[in-house]
Every structure is written in structure tokens, then in C-alpha cells.
């Protein structure tokens, strides 16, 4: 297609709203922009813009033409940005959100290590157990745990996570060891943000509603209660590994352990992923692979 300058002039006039704004953006005169648009209309054999002394308005043909053309120039800009990113180190502000405990224990140290490698980068880390709307609240990425529910986000698996039910030896000696999922109904269960625990029953995912006196949206609080003999708790294996090794906690219902949960890094869909996001995600994956996960 010939005369890209005419198409660019037209799309910038529509995007910016006036001939003068388009002229400033393209560093030419307003009269030059006007001539280019007129030549484009002559080339196409149709009027694209209604012109008044105060504003412009698209004709039906102009609206249709603009919808097709704007994607071309957006693609050009993204292509240039992608090339520039390949040649530069991450800079600017990277906004990340993660859950409290997991973010503090595992994600924050990796963020700090990444920042040491890239001193021009700033990071805003927000720890919350609330499900953040990345697009609405302006975050670049999130670390999320469990099944992925939002199909509008791109997700990359970081870790596979096993959910384990454990209790202290003292609790089990006093209350007995549960042998079936139905046995949970007669036990004190230490409950997190959901009152349903995940299990794998003969290859099928199963959720069991549990009950107990303590509810808390903090794994550390629930872990402390379990260590004090207050009940059963379901937590990720990485949370409790050291206490299992010391014998301070004992696993139960291992035949039903749910091993198909995961930890994900998620981010909004973009045709071009900025270098700061792309490089941080690659760094996370590489560090986790080298440490053989959590």
C-alpha cells in the first residue's frame, strides 16, 4: 500500500482530535496534515471527515477506515517498543501483588535479588490476601495460589503445591487419628479463608466442608494453633516441612492428599509484554527451577 504518510496523518487526526494536535505530534504544519488527509480522501474516492471550525467528525466510511488503520499503527508502535526493550534493561516501576505469608517468605527475597541486578527498576509490592483486579488497580502482575478462575489473565505455573492435613502428636493422641474424609466431622478443624478443604478421592477432586472454633485468614496463625494441639489444619507442604521433620506435626489422610494445586504468576493480556515484566517472570521461573521449587 502506498502513501503511508497520508494514512498516518488521518489516524493521528482522529486519535488526537484536531489537525493542529496531529501536526504537533508529527512535527509538521497543520496545513500539511490537512493536505495529506484530502489526498487520502481523493485516493479512496470517499469523504472520511466532516470538518467544522471547531471540531472534526468521522463519516461512516471514515469510522470504518479508522478502525482498520489504527491497529496497523498500534502494531508498528508495539514493534518498535519490543525492539527497544530487547536492547535495554528493565526500568520504571513494576507493580506486584501477592499473598501475605507466601509473598513475605518467598516472593520478596526474589524481588530483592532482581532489583540488585537492575538498579534502574523500582518495585511496588503490595501484600494482600484479597483477590486484586490487576487491570482496574494498575498492577503489572500477581502471584496467585490455587485454581485459575480469571480467563482474561495469562497464567504461568511457578510451583506445584501439595495440600496436607496435619496435627500435633498431642492432639492426635487425645482425639484419635482420622482415617476417612467422613472422620473430619468429629474433629476440630483450623479454618482459613475457606471452610472447604481439597482432597483427591480415587482420582476425583473433592471438597469437604469442615468446622471448628478457629477461623483465620493467616497460615501462620493456623500453623501456631496446630502446633499448640488445637486441631487439624490443611496447609501447603512447604509451610510445614520443617515441623514434619522435627516431629512437631504429623500428616494424616495422606491417601487423600490433594497434589494438583499450583502457584501461578499472572498478568494482563498484552500483545507486547514490557521488558520489566517479561524479565522478572523469566527470573522467577529460572530461580525456582534452580532451587527445585519450594
Image (cartoon, rainbow, N blue to C red):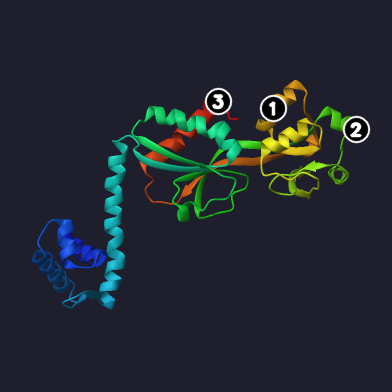
Lower position in the chain sequence, tag 1 or tag 3: 1
Residue at point 79%, 36% (across, down): 255
Q: Which residue is mark 1?
A: 241
> With respect to residue 44, does 237 lie above or below?
above
Frontmost of labels 1 and 2 is 2
Q: Quadrant of residue 278?
A: top left
**Quadrant showing the C terminus:** top right
User: Residue 223, image x and y in percent?
Assistant: 72, 34
Label 1 – label 2 distance at C-alpha = 23 Å
User: Residue 286, image x and y in percent?
Assistant: 48, 30
Q: Which mark is residue 62?
A: none
Lower position in the chain sequence, tag 1 or tag 2: 2
* In the image, farthest residue toward the top: 246
Label 3 – label 2 distance at C-alpha = 39 Å
User: Residue 77, image x and y in percent?
Assistant: 27, 51
Asked if the residue under mark 2 is in contact with the one under mark 1, i.e. CB atoms within 8 Å, the reply is: no
Element under disc 3: loop
Residue at point 17%, 67% (across, down): 19
In depth, the one of 67 and 246 nearer the eye is: 246
Lower position in the chain sequence, tag 3 or tag 2: 2
**Quadrant showing the N terminus:** bottom left
Q: Which residue is mark 2?
A: 174
Label 1 – label 3 distance at C-alpha = 16 Å
User: Residue 65, image x and y in percent?
Assistant: 27, 69
Q: Quadrant of residue 237?
A: top right
Frontmost of labels 3 and 2 is 2
**With 116 as the anchor, is 156 left or right in this view?**
right
Is residue 189 visible to us here?
A: yes
Q: Which residue is mark 3?
A: 291
Element under disc 2: helix
Residue at point 28%, 36% (across, down): 87
Amino acid at each position: 500500500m502506498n502513501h503511508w504518510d497520508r494514512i498516518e496523518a488521518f489516524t493521528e487526526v482522529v486519535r488526537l482530535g484536531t489537525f493542529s494536535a496531529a501536526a504537533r505530534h508529527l512535527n509538521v504544519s497543520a496545513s500539511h496534515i490537512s493536505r495529506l488527509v484530502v489526498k487520502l480522501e481523493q485516493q479512496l474516492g470517499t469523504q472520511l471527515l466532516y470538518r467544522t471550525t471547531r471540531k472534526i467528525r468521522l463519516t461512516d466510511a471514515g469510522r470504518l477506515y479508522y478502525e482498520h488503520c489504527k491497529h496497523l499503527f498500534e502494531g508498528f508502535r508495539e514493534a518498535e517498543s519490543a525492539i527497544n526493550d530487547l536492547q535495554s534493561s528493565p526500568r520504571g516501576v513494576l507493580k506486584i501483588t501477592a499473598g501475605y505469608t507466601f509473598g513475605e517468605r518467598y516472593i520478596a527475597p526474589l524481588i530483592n535479588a532482581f532489583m540488585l541486578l537492575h538498579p534502574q527498576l523500582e518495585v511496588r509490592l503490595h501484600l494482600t490476601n484479597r483477590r486484586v483486579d490487576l487491570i482496574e488497580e494498575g498492577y503489572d502482575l500477581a502471584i496467585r495460589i490455587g485454581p485459575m478462575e480469571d480467563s482474561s489473565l495469562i497464567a504461568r505455573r511457578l510451583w506445584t503445591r501439595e495440600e496436607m492435613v496435619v496435627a500435633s502428636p498431642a492432639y492426635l493422641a487425645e482425639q484419635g487419628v482420622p482415617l476417612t474424609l467422613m472422620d473430619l466431622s468429629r474433629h476440630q478443624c483450623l479454618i482459613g479463608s475457606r471452610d472447604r478443604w481439597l482432597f483427591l478421592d480415587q482420582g476425583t477432586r473433592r471438597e469437604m466442608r469442615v468446622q471448628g472454633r478457629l477461623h483465620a485468614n493467616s497460615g501462620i496463625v493456623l500453623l501456631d494453633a496446630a502446633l499448640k494441639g488445637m486441631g487439624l489444619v490443611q496447609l501447603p507442604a512447604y509451610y510445614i516441612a520443617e515441623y514434619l521433620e522435627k516431629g512437631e506435626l504429623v500428616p494424616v489422610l495422606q491417601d487423600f492428599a490433594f497434589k494438583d494445586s499450583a502457584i501461578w504468576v499472572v498478568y494482563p493480556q498484552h500483545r507486547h509484554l514490557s521488558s520489566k515484566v517479561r524479565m522478572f517472570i523469566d527470573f522467577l521461573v529460572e530461580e525456582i527451577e534452580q532451587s527445585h521449587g519450594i
